[in-house]
Image: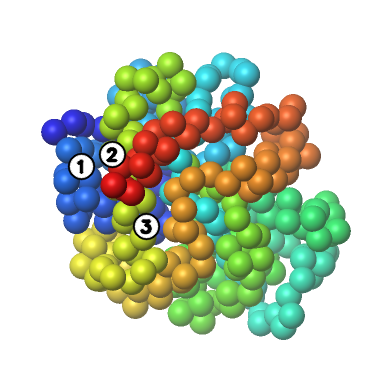
Amino acid sequence: MECLAISATAHGLNYLPEYHAASSGLFGKLGLEVTARPRDPWTGVLDDLADGAADVALGGLWVPAMYAGKARDLVVVGQLNARFPMVVVTRASVADFEWAWMTGRTVLVPGAGGTAPYEFTAGLMREAGTPPAGTRFVRDLSSDMLTELFVKGLGDAILLDLLSATRLEERGAGNMTCRLADVGGPMPNSVYYVRRDRLEPVHDRLVALLAGVGTAMGQLTAGTVPVEGLLAREWPDIGIGALDRAAAELMANGTWSSNRVDPAACARWVAMLRTAGAVDRDIAYEELVDNSALDDAELAQAR
């Protein structure tokens, strides 16, 4: 049995295909034992890659993009999320929401886990012709802290992951007004990336990882496997109703539609990051993404 260590930026419901592949034996059937640990702060994934404590990092594509041509040579080998499954939760119900609604309002955007929640939201606003500068964004703090402040009256809206948004709405403390997975379209949100110099040594294990995750995605989106037990084990302190509801939405909204990074979606996301100043040049898809392991995984699955 080969071993593969993953260092993840979070322990999230949007990572469910990986957890399903591990718990159901999909990885084991491919001769792979996967260990994964979430890092807090999330930047620990970079330390783990650097010192060899982890073979693979799981997090935002924006990290390899920002480092492209700079201090760390990181390359994406596949994606776990093909959508950005966060939600604009408004204090009051908003009919026919458009991004212009944000102008002049205060919006809380957690950022302790990275910059993507704000930058993708701001990118969508720019695409719609709504300047983000017209909105007062409260940023760079944890989801728990900003959620508590929102419930106590701060802000007109808050951007949350789907599970947190679902739980907030169930409490009657907000309205799930705009789902970014729906309005934002394809977006390589959570990806697997490695050190480029480690591509060859970990290639075969990456093939097994991506094959297992791909199979898990297919099973989850097809609704052919029960997930209640897995959800209860992974998040024992959260009510199964909210977990079921959020997981069902992730199965349906395209988040787990493919583990191959779409070139057009990648280029769009990188362009948003460049507009924001987070990257300082155009980055070719081939520089940022290496599909060799995924190609072999798909060939193996097709046999």
Which residue is most to the front? 303
Task: Report, in whole angstroms, how far the alpha carbon at label 3 lies from the one at label 1.
Answer: 16 Å
Residue at image coords 33%, 36%: 207
Q: Amino acid at mark 3?
A: Met
Q: Identify the mark at residue 208; answer none if there is no mark.
A: 2
Residue at image coords 73%, 75%: 97
Q: Which residue is mark 1?
A: 30
In the displayed structure image, the side of residue 228 where residue 180 appears, left or right:
right
Is any atom of residue 237 visible in this view? no
Q: Position of residue 126 (x, y in %)?
A: 80, 53
Residue at image coords 29%, 47%: 303
In the displayed structure image, the side of residue 133 where residue 53 appears, left or right:
left
Colour setting = rainbow
Using the image, determine if residue 56 lies above or below residue 188: above
Earlier residue among tags 3 and 1: 1
Image quadrant occupied by the N terminus: top left
User: Who is closer to the viewer here, 292 or 55?
Assistant: 292
Q: Residues within 10 Å of mark 3 (few under 14, many from 20)?
A: many
Q: Position of residue 125 (x, y in %)?
A: 77, 57
Image quarter of residue 108:
bottom right
Q: Residues within 10 Å of mark 1 (few under 14, many from 20)?
A: some
Earlier residue among tags 2 and 3: 2
Q: Residues within 10 Å of mark 2 (few under 14, many from 20)?
A: many
User: Who is closer to the viewer here, 298 or 104?
Assistant: 298
Q: Identify the mark at residue 217; answer none if there is no mark.
A: 3
Residue at image coords 63%, 60%: 185
Q: Secondary structure at mark 1?
A: loop
In the displayed structure image, the side of residue 119 where residue 41 appears, left or right:
left
